[in-house]
Each structure stands twice: as C-alpha cells, then as structure tokens.
Amino acid sequence: MSEAVVMDAAVEPAESPLTPESWGKLGMWVFLAGDAMSFGALIVGYGLFRVGSSNWPRPSDVLGINLTALMTFLLICSSVTMVLSLSAIKNGDQSGFKKFLSLTVLAGIAFLGLQAYEWTHLIHEGLTLTGNPFGAALFGATFFVLTGFHGCHVFGGVVYLSTVLVQGVRGRYGEHRHNEVEIAGLYWHFVDLVWILIFTFVYLV
Amino acid sequence: MTTAHTETNYIGVFWWLSGLTILEIAVIYVPMARLIVVILLIGLALSKAVLVAMYFMHLKFERVTLGMIALTPLILCVFLILMLLPDIT
C-alpha cells in the first residue's frame, strides 16, 4: 500500500515552472509565440516587398481606412468584453460571464462579416492575389495573405470561444475553475494584438 | 501583486487603446515628412500591442521568463529584417 502511494507521488506531474496555475497556460503561450513568428515572418515579408517595390500604391488610396478603423475598434471592444468575462467568472458571476463572452463572440462574427464585405468590394475593384489595377501586383498578394491568415485566426477564435461559452452554459466554470476561460482569452487577445499591428502596417503606413 | 492584478482598470486600458487608434489615423492625414509618420505609426502600434499584452494578457503580472518567451518572436523578426534587407537594397 505504502509502495503504491510512493509510486503515485512519483508520477504526479510537476507544477508548470512559469505558469503555476496550469500547464495549459504555458502551452498556450508557447503556441502563441510560435504563431507570432508566422505572423512576424508574413509582416516582415510584406514590408520588404514594399520597400523593394517602385510602384507600391498608398494603402489609404486603395483600402477603406474608415471601415477598418471600425473593425479595429470592434476587436478592441471584444478584448475588453473578454477580460470582463474572465473577471466575472473569477468572482462567480455566471450571468456576467456568459453575457460578456457572448458579446466577445458576436464582435468576432461582426469583424468577419465586415472583412468579407471589404474583400468582396476590393475584388470587384480588381484587386486579386495576382492583379492590382492600382500598382504593384504584390500589393494584392500580400494584402490577401496577411488579412486572410488573420481572418482564419478570428474564425478559429470564434469557434474556440463558442465552445467555451457552451461549456459555460452547461455550468463547467465557476469561481474555482476558470483556467480554461483565461487560456481562451489569451488566444483572443493575441488575435487582437496582431490586428493592431496589421492595421498599422497594411492600412496606415 | 495579486491584488493589483484583480484591480486592473480594463476600461482605462480601453480608452487608451481607442485614443491611440484615433491618434494613428490622425497622423496619416497630418502633412509631415514620411519618415516621421512611419516612426510615429510604428511607435503607436507597438504601444498598443504592449498595452494588450501587459494588461489584457496579464503579462505584467506573470514571471519574467514568460515575458521573454513572448518577446522572442519580436527579436527574431528584427533578425529577419536585418538578414533580408541586403537582398532588396
């Protein structure tokens, strides 16, 4: 019997060294660091193509800054509702948690809708992966790859947060169990953070 | 430290992020040297990114090593720029 206890102690997983709350949180951070390298490589690639091009159009002449400013505002709001949702569940406020998480998911869906509208508009104007009536063809390629890669992340985030919401409605989370909500929040804030950079480098600079 | 964590003023951070976004959009319409505009925009974008990471992702309240993991991609991007720049100039 005592031997069994000792063996159990031996296989007990050690505490995560950087995130004492859970290993999952460390896992998400490492994943996000890797994902950031993918985004970083795409943004750097975009920047270098642009610097090396002689006929790169001014983004504000081709892209709608007002619409994307609204999209940026939506994502910032969704990040706020996400932290408020986590804050609510930490205090055991179930209805606040569900309300704010639902708003986060809705903001994500609205963002995707606006992006679909923007893409459709630009494609009708002739901007495609291989063509650009306003100047350098690579403008279209880099624009669609960068915003598309980010849009896929938003879509993934909407699905991810929806599953957390469903689990929340089933009563899985509470004052003493909210680690999964925090980890999902990390992903969502990362998507917001990357959009802040894309908005600046692709639309404003 | 834990109490500071729970008392983060999220709405305050929201106002900062919104204000900096408005400032960014204003900057592109102000007639200034292109280089100054670019430096300002990059500075404002990085400030916003830091605000999100520090307060929304709670990095300010995490261990320093975790912050170093989070910073690694940025350092690698700087290397990438330095390594690729000779190819286009």
Image (tube, rainbow, N blue to C red):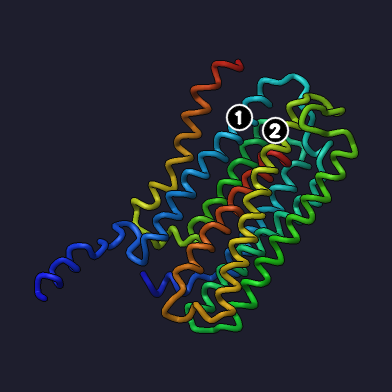
Name the residue carrying label 1. Answer: A45
A156 relative position to A20: left or right: right
Q: Residue at x 54, y 22 (%)?
A: B84
Percent coordinates x, y for residue B4 in the rendering: 42, 71
Indicate the quadrant containing the C terminus of chain A: top left, top right, bottom left or bottom right. Answer: top right
B16 relative position to A54: left or right: left
Percent coordinates x, y for residue B30 in the rendering: 76, 41
Please give the chain letter of the residue carrying mark 2.
A
Q: Residue furthest right?
A: A124
Disc 1 residue type (three-letter): Gly
A136 relative position to A158: left or right: right
Disc 2 residue type (three-letter): Thr
User: In the picture shown, does residue B41 fall above or below B11?
Assistant: above
Q: Residue at x 61, y 63 (%)?
A: A79
Percent coordinates x, y for residue A45 in the rendering: 61, 29
How many marks are shown on the rendered structure?
2
Name the residue carrying label 2. Answer: A142
Q: Residue at x 60, y 83 (%)?
A: A95
Q: Please tell me the numbered disc located at residue B37.
A: none
User: In the picture shown, does residue A20 fall above or below A142?
Assistant: below
Q: Residue at x 79, y 50 (%)?
A: A116
